[in-house]
Amino acid sequence: MANIQPHSAEPAVVQGSTKPQVVYIHIPFCTNKCFYCDFNSYVLKDQPVMAYLQGLEREMERTVKEVPPGEIKSIFVGGGTPTVLKPDEMEYFLKTVRTYFPNWSDTIEFSMEANPGTTDLEKLSVMREGGVNRVSFGVQSFNNGLLERIGRIHDTDDVYQSLENARKAGFENMSIDLMFGLPNQTVEMLAESVDKALALGLPHYSIYSLKVEENTLFHTMYKKNQLPLPSEDEELQMYLLLMNRMKEAGYEQYEISNFAKPGYHSRHNMAYWLNEDYYGLGAGAHGYIGRQRHMNIKGVNPYTEATKEELPRLESFTVPKEEAMEDFMMVGLRVLSGVSEQHFREQFGLSIEDVFAKPLHKMLDAGLLDKTEAGYRLSEKGLLFGNDVFGEFIGSLTSKE
């Protein structure tokens, strides 16, 4: 997202549904901290898990009183590693979700992130019975040496066992995450991981490039010149390999980092990319409703204590119209079908061309964007240089103020 700061722009036009249909819930506990991770997560040992889940219930209760939900079409539970919850904790948590968000669409996508090695059959069965119908496994690689070097606690045997357990528990809609651009990773190592991933025949794959974030072990190593990353050319070759192999295997690349069989796009992420309203619940979670953005208190105990008094907000503010338009373009262009002129008009009452003529023409002339019947999308070339395209829109309106 663009760097959002409140300022004295014109009053924002409230957009989107007054009854949100999308829910994000954060479970901040992990078995350990991976070397690349800057998410709001805490090692599980000695954490007050049940007290946190009770705080989460209080936030849900207050949230739906303030902004009642519509028919829920997507719930996503992320972290952390939500599957570190014990079966009884998981059962309590899922019952709470159903209590405060009871009106589920017949086609709801209820996703939960999982780490291989934290998903036995009993826990997965509790998840399935509680309404979860999609599991996203953080696999990252099928190379055990590489997994160890990036701080993962699982190995490839855990991956196969977790997927088998999930199938036994009744899950059909499963996804796995892979990563590329990792330290000491070669194009050949990635190709082997992709082959093993595709052999599983899953309906969805997310494949992300490593980004070295501040406040991570990898960032510390990078600053000391101790992180042997692939070259830019090698990373480009990895991305081209991914796109070609996934296409050959019959998967549609519907977003820069996501590939799916027909009908298995991540509906939750599509809500983000289409700039739709969503609830954000839990420590450090972000929410976006009626162009009001909030971020919750991050720490487990501070968050839990805050829920006893009020909504656990760290900050809450209106996103100015100009900033919301920039965000619309940045996140919308990640999707390969591109941004919709009609959708933009519905949200902002203006045309994309009128607002972004200069960056649009620059990117069209450079061959990085294509004009479509619906609006604009990244070209084949633009797909390889997406960050350059997004950078043209970020700040193109707000930097003038």
Image (cartoon, grey):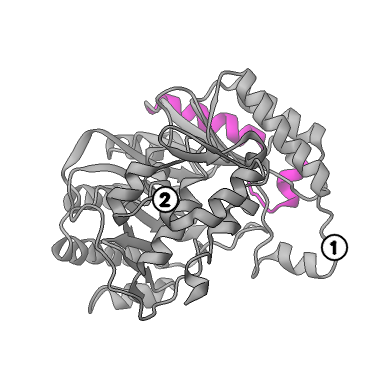
- Reading the image, the residue beneath label 2 is 352
Mark number for residue 226?
A: 1
Tell me the CA gap for discs 2 and 1: 44 Å
Residue range corresponding to the magenta coloring: 145-169
Q: Residue 243, percent across and down? A: 65, 30
Q: Is residue 110 magenta?
A: no
The image quadrant of residue 145 is top right
Q: Residue 135, percent across and down? A: 44, 37
Look at 75% across and 41% down and name the residue there.
236
Query: Callout 1 environment at 10 Å: few (<14), some (14 to 19), or many (20+)?
Result: few
Secondary structure of the residue carrying numbered label 1: loop
Q: In the visual, does 145 lie left or right of 211?
A: right
Q: Is residue 148 magenta?
A: yes
* Residue 154 shows up from this direction: no
Q: Residue 326, percent across and down? A: 46, 59
Q: Residue 327, percent across and down? A: 45, 58
Q: Which sits in the foreground, 370 or 179? A: 370
Give the amino acid at mark 2.
Ile
Q: Look at the magenta stretch and give its main secondary structure.
A: helix
- Label 1 near label 2: C-beta < 8 Å? no
Q: Which sits in the foreground, 54 or 335? A: 335
Give whichever of discs 2 and 1 has the lower sequence position: 1
The image quadrant of residue 214 is bottom right
Q: In the visual, does 236 lie left or right of 302?
A: right
